[in-house]
Amino acid sequence: MIDEEPVTVHRASDGPGLYAVFGQPIAHSLSPRIHAAFARDLSIALEYRAIEASAEDFVGALAAFADRGGLGANVTLPLKQHAARLCLSVSERARQADSVNTLVRRGEGWHGESTDGVGLIRDITGRHGLYVRGRRTLLLGAGGAARAVAFALLDAGISELTIANRTPERADALADAIGKPEGVHTRYWSDLGQWGSFDLIVNATSAGHGRMSLALPPSLMAPRAVCYDLSYGRASFGFLAWARSAGASHAVDGLGMLVEQAAEAFEVWHGRRPETDAIYAELRAYLPGDAED
Ligand code: NAP
């Protein structure tokens, strides 16, 4: 388990509140920088660490964090479903999705919340000015983030959801959890060429982190389709390059979602919603562009 140097902001006399993000890999997480910027803007004292934890380490690492006085944590790849299991209580959104990305200390235990879905919808509709209502949607992946965004996309009014995952049982489990057989379908990855075409394609796989190609055919793209990759930076380059070459009208990475889900988490912890545009612009300038390797 690697404990990264904390970002410390505005030390108050009784010490800053302790927060963290858990995941693996975590060393390059932008969350400490985002929460530091929010805290600075709103003059809230906090320490926010990035803590590397595998699925096996997570329970122990979170207990050690609670012992040190940890008040709240974000949880990322691959821990969101594990986090849902160890909460004493969860929000309705987190329960539906069986996915927790935000933990809040309540007494002796953790309360779990899921802010990924609302972060995605805020970014697509608010920042990028795109609509989702009525779109035939393909969701690639069925992990913790995919589960959260599936419910949010349906709530936002997509007309139909097709879910495809490398491990088909997880796609089926997600479709079963949603429970709308008339509007939600699953497809085998091996039948990729026969899935039809879609107006919105959301990549919620982590394939890009390992530079793995999803080998998608251009036939998936309906005219004027929007493509969204939950990942950002180099991990998103492969999918976004495919989207552009296959004729997407918009190919968007998940940087804005990252900032928006963080703002939601910040509000859960501190009761105040930060502005997101400045830190989004700062991170956009800092991240490598598509032209770079
Ligand atoms: P996760 O729970 O570990 O799920 C990973 C998903 O990716 C699973 O569906 C997995 O399929 C699939 N996958 C992994 N490697 C693959 C490959 N080579 N080919 C095809 N599918 C593959 O992770 P997560 O928390 O859901 O995160 C998923 C992605 O979303 C990550 O890139 C993460 O960085 C991003 N994300 C971004 C934000 C944001 O705010 N922008 C928020 C959350 C997540 P199997 O089920 O077959 O293993």
Image (cartoon, rainbow, N blue to C red):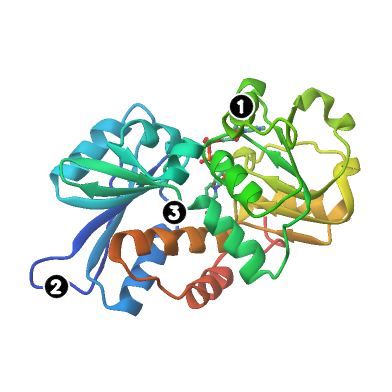
Q: Which dot marks residue 64?
A: none
Identify the residue under disc 1: 176
**Dot 3 amino acid type:** Ser
Residue occupying image coordinates x 19% and y 39%: 64
Residue closer to the observer: 237 or 101: 101
CB within 8 Å, label 2 to label 3: no
Identify the residue under disc 2: 12
Residue closer to the observer: 159 or 58: 159
Question: Is residue 140 left or right of 249 when viewed as pictured?
Answer: left
Q: Position of residue 149 (x, y in %)?
A: 59, 46
Q: Circle 1 sits in a helix, a strand or a loop, which is it? A: helix
Residue occupying image coordinates x 80% and y 23%: 190
Ligand 1: quadrant of the figure? top right
Identify the residue under disc 3: 29
Disc 2, ligand 1: is the CB inside 8 Å? no
The crowding category of the residue bearing disc 2, from other C-alpha atoms within 10 Å (few below 14, some 14 to 19, many at least 20), is few
